[in-house]
Image (spheres, grey):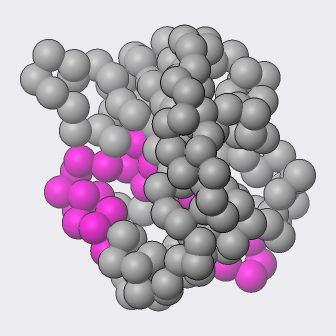
Amino acid sequence: MQDTRIRLLEMLDPRQVEALADLLVDCIDGGAGVSFLHPLAPETAKAFWRGVAADVAAGERALLVAEDEVGIVGTVQLVLAQPENQPHRADLSKMLVHRRGRRRGLGAALLNAAEQTARQYGKTLLVLDTNTGSDAERLYERSGWVRVGEIPDFSVQPHGGLCATTVFYKSL
């Protein structure tokens, strides 16, 4: 993780939207199961990030990015806007690491930064779901997240085929 920094974005400019769209396309090309199918059109990816940007500007979402010498290499989101009876929790969402940044501890660093950010927002409980059997699932287990269970046939993988999801939580 040398020469990589993680920071919280309070707004997104068009350059960052473009970089995040490139990151999302790379992850989908690599088979990551994060809501989109392959091939992911760059315009679809940009539209997604423009929606995230609106949520960030409204204070409904926190967006962390990891940057290396090339640019944005990873990201993770905290969905802060929750129902009235759940102000203490956030959903961890869309943790993405570019294939050029994998196997360097970047996922663990993003996860740690997200947990710290959640605490700063007064959140005491985080929840997430991830593809069963994925590298991300192993990361969450190593990082002290509690496995709740598995839902079979939860989503379609980017290159086809159904995949189960595993639900986790972590008390902060």
Residue most extreme to the left? 84
On screen, residue 68 above or below 117: below
- Left or right side of 75 for 134: right
Location of residue 38 by image quarter: bottom right
**Segment colored magenta:** 50-78
On screen, residue 14 above or below 89: below
On screen, residue 104 above or below 3: above
- Left or right side of 20 for 4: right
Residue most extreme to the front? 161
Q: Is residue 73 magenta?
A: yes
Q: Residue shown at 22%/38% (left/top)?
A: 81
Residue 116 in percent (x, y) is at 53, 32
Q: Residue shown at 75%/33% (left/top)?
A: 133
On screen, residue 156 above or below 80: below
Q: Is residue 154 magenta?
A: no
- Left or right side of 53 for 109: right
Residue 108 in percent (x, y) is at 73, 39
Residue 152 in percent (x, y) is at 56, 27
Location of residue 55 by image quarter: bottom left
Q: Residue shown at 23%/48% (left/top)?
A: 60
Q: Nearer the viewer, residue 7 or 151?
A: 151
- Asked whether residue 18 appears in the rendered view, the answer is no
